[in-house]
C-alpha cells in the first residue's frame, strides 16, 4: 500500500501528542533536575504523560497500515532510539533508556509486515492478549537483562523511559486494527479540517515529530538551566 496524500487528522493528532509530550517533559525536568515539587509519577501529570504515549502508539499503528515501507521507517526510528540509549547511558548510567517509546515504535514498524494480512478482529484479540501478558509480567523479576524489552525486569531495574513490548505492543496493534477499519481506502475522514489554521499548524508539527522528539529535551534543559542561572545571579546581586 502506498500513501497518496498525508492524512490531515493523523498529522494533527500527532502534533497534539508532541505538544503533550513536551509539556510532560518540562514537568519531569523541573522535578528531576531542579527539585520542583511536581509529582510526575502519580495523578494528573502521570496520566497526561501516559495519554501522550498511548496516542503516539495508536497513531503509529494506524500509520503502519498506510505506509508503503514501514520497515524503512522502523530502521530510521531504531537508529534514533539507539542514539538516545547511548546518550542517556553517558549521562545517567544507572537509569539509561534501554527500551523506551522510540524503541517500541520502531519494533512495531519492523513487525508490521507480519501483520499486514491480519484482520482487524485478530489484531484486537492479539493486542488484548499482549496487554494481558504484560500485566502478568509486572510483578515478575528475572536475572536475564536480555528480557527487558519484553517487560521482564531484573531486580533493581530503573530507566528514565520504559515501554516494553508487553503490554505496549498491544496498543500499537489496536492502532493497526483502527487503520484497517477506518482507512481501508487511505482517504482522510476529515478533509475539511485542513483549512483551519490551528489544524495546519498542528499538522506541520506532527509531520516533524521525530525531529521535535530528538531536539526538545536539549532545548528545554538549556532554557531551564539558563533561567536558573539568571535567577541565582539576580538573587546574588539584589540589594
Image (cartoon, grey):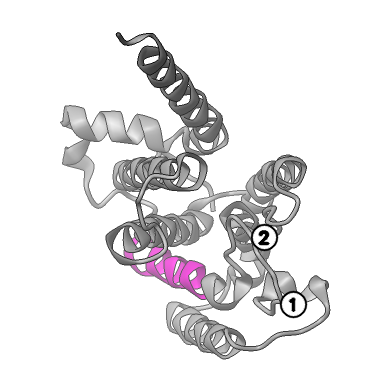
x and y percentages locating residue 188 in the rendered image: 29, 48
Give 8 or 34, whichever is nearer the viewer.
Answer: 34
Task: Identify the residue shown where x is 43% and y is 47%.
Answer: 31
Does the stretch in magenta take in 149?
no
Q: Residue furthest front?
A: 239
Chain-order first, disc 1 or disc 2:
2
Q: Position of residue 165 (x, y in %)?
A: 62, 72
In the rendered view, tell whether residue 153 sits above or below residue 60: below
Residue 135 image offset from top left, x and y in percent: 52, 86
Seen from the viewer's position, the closer of residues 9 and 224 is 224
Give the x, y percent position of residue 105.
Answer: 58, 57
User: What residue is rendered at 54% in x and 77% in y?
Assistant: 167
Q: SS for tag 2?
A: loop
Q: Nearer the viewer, residue 160 or 238?
A: 238
Query: Label 2: few (<14), some or many (≥20) within 10 Å?
Result: many
Q: Give the residue number, with chain letter if any, for mark 2.
A: 99
Q: Residue at x 33, y 63 (%)?
A: 47
Q: Indicate the secondary structure of the residue bearing disc 1.
A: loop
Tag 1–tag 2 contact (CB < 8 Å): no
Q: Which residue is mark 1?
A: 154
Left or right of 146, for residue 78: left
Q: Quadrant of the C terminus?
A: top left
Magenta stretch bounds: 170-184
Confirm whether the magenta stretch covers residue 176: yes
Front tag of 1 and 2: 1
**Mark 1 vs mark 2, CA separation in Å:** 14 Å
In the rendering, which numbered label is found on residue 128? none
Q: How many marks?
A: 2
User: Is disc 1 surrounded by few (<14), some (14 to 19) or many (20+) residues within 10 Å?
Assistant: some
* Magenta stretch prevailing secondary structure: helix
**Which sits in the foreground, 228 or 188?**
228
* In this rendering, position of residue 51 left or right of residue 120: left
Amino acid at each position: 500500500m502506498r500513501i497518496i496524500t498525508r492524512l490531515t487528522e493523523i498529522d494533527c493528532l500527532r502534533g497534539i501528542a508532541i505538544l503533550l509530550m513536551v509539556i510532560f517533559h518540562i514537568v519531569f525536568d523541573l522535578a528531576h533536575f531542579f527539585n520542583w515539587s511536581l509529582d510526575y509519577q502519580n495523578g494528573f501529570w502521570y496520566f497526561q504523560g501516559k495519554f501522550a504515549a498511548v496516542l503516539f502508539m495508536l497513531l503509529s499503528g494506524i500509520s503502519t497500515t498506510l505506509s508503503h515501507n514501514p520497515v524503512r521507517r522502523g530502521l530510521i526510528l531504531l537508529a534514533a532510539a539507539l542514539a538516545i540509549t547511548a546518550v542517556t547511558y553517558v549521562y545517567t548510567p544507572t537509569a539509561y533508556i534501554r527500551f523506551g517509546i522510540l524503541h517500541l515504535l520502531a519494533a512495531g514498524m519492523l513487525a508490521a509486515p507480519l501483520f499486514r494480512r491480519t484482520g482487524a478482529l485478530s489484531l484486537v484479540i492479539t493486542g488484548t492478549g499482549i496487554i494481558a501478558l504484560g500485566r502478568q509480567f509486572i510483578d515478575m523479576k528475572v536475572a536475564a537483562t536480555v528480557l527487558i524489552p519484553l517487560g521482564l525486569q531484573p531486580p533493581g531495574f530503573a530507566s528514565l523511559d520504559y515501554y516494553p513490548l508487553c503490554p505496549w505492543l498491544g496498543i500499537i496493534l489496536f492502532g493497526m486494527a483502527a487503520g484497517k477499519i477506518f482507512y481501508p481506502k487511505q482517504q482522510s475522514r476529515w478533509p475539511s479540517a485542513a483549512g483551519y489554521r490551528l489544524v495546519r499548524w498542528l499538522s506541520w508539527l506532527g509531520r516533524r515529530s521525530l525531529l521535535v522528539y530528538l531536539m526538545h529535551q536539549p532545548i528545554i534543559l538549556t532554557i531551564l538551566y539558563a533561567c536558573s542561572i539568571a535567577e541565582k545571579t539576580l538573587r546574588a546581586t539584589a540589594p
